Image (cartoon, rainbow, N blue to C red):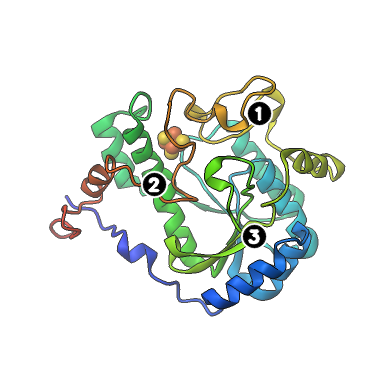
Amino acid sequence: MALQIDLDEQVETPQLSLIMDELEAGEAAVELDDKAPQEVIAWAIDRFGSELAICSSFQAEGCLLIDMAWRIDPKIRVFTIDTGRQPQATYDLIDKVRERYEIKTEVFLPDTKVVEQMVTKHGNNLFYGDVNKRLLCCQVRKVLPLRRALMNYSAWMTGLRRDQWATRSNIRKIEIDHDHGGIVKLAPLADWTEQEVWDYLRANDVPYNALYDQGYKSIGCEPCTRAVGEGQDPRGGRWWWETGAPKECGMHCAIETGGFEHELAALLGRNGDGHTNGGG
Ligand code: SF4
């Protein structure tokens, strides 16, 4: 039976009121580039109000952003993508943040039917040993729920930093997100280092994921993340079995390998010509 999901429908421009155009975003990017994270966050809260949300996977940077933004506006909205495969420590932290800041994190889950079809066909641990199946899983469990989540906001704020990985070296503190209907994407920590992040967390007693104390440096889904040794690349513990593949899931940059897209289209009930199979 075909599934009632359509990728194109999910990237339409949201019906929100505070969208920016390319010119305004470009001017703001220049103005904000050398500003401290707090100034960028304050600017965004003023500009987008309740149509702004922090997207957090509850890594160190996401927790920092929540703390900084909450100090400026305790009503700051926060959302997360729950892939269904996250470590218990991450769920514990979400609840801890909820209690500490009285923030009700908005949680977005993958489409049940698509996950059911994917794991029935390829197994629960399809990601090991095949990059395209890993990317397929990331699409189903992360990228598609993110697209649905972003229909609710005019702007989203992330904890991305330029020195995390080569694909992130050119991110701007504010840009138009063409992958998500032209809403605004902010990265107030773009020019911060890992050391600055941890200095802030400790100075402000910000809750953080307990896995960091076990040698983890970057934390995603439980089966796809492991601790790294001292001095090793912080993202080296993500999809550690892969060689030559991007340490990205597709949430922050489009990944087109020509390998997983056909399978994704099939799971979504679409033909190769882009049309949905059958009815309902
Ligand atoms: S990180 Fe692993 S479990 Fe999580 S969505 Fe990607 S492939 Fe699936």
Image height of 120 relative to 18, above or below:
above
What kind of residue is marked 2? Ile
Q: Residues within 10 Å of mark 2 (few under 14, many from 20)?
A: some
Residue nearest the observer in this picture, 27 or 126: 27
Residue 190 as seen in the image, left or right of residue 155: right
Disc assigned to residue 211 = 1
Residue 171 as seen in the image, left or right of residue 276: right
Q: Is mark 3 within 8 Å of ligand 1?
A: no
What residue occupies the far right of the structure in this picture? Answer: 203
Q: Secondary structure at mark 2?
A: loop
How far is the residue under mark 3 from the one under mark 2?
Answer: 21 Å
Disc 3 vs disc 1: Cβ atoms closer than 8 Å?
A: no
Image height of 280 relative to 134, above or below:
below
Disc assigned to residue 173 = 3
Q: Residues within 10 Å of mark 1 (few under 14, many from 20)?
A: some
How far is the residue under mark 2 from the one under mark 1?
Answer: 28 Å
- Residue 194 appears in which quarter of the rendering? top right
Image height of 227 relative to 109, above or below:
above
The residue shown at (34%, 40%) is: 136
Q: Earlier in the sequence, mark 3 or mark 2?
A: 3
- Residue 60 appears in which quarter of the rendering? top right
Residue 64 as seen in the image, left or right of residue 110: right
The residue shown at (61%, 49%) is: 160
What kind of residue is marked 1? Leu
What kind of residue is marked 3? Lys
* Residue 241 horizontal/vertical position (percent): 45, 22
Disc assigned to residue 164 = none
* Pair 2/1: label in front: 2
Disc assigned to residue 255 = 2
Disc 3 vs disc 2: Cβ atoms closer than 8 Å?
A: no
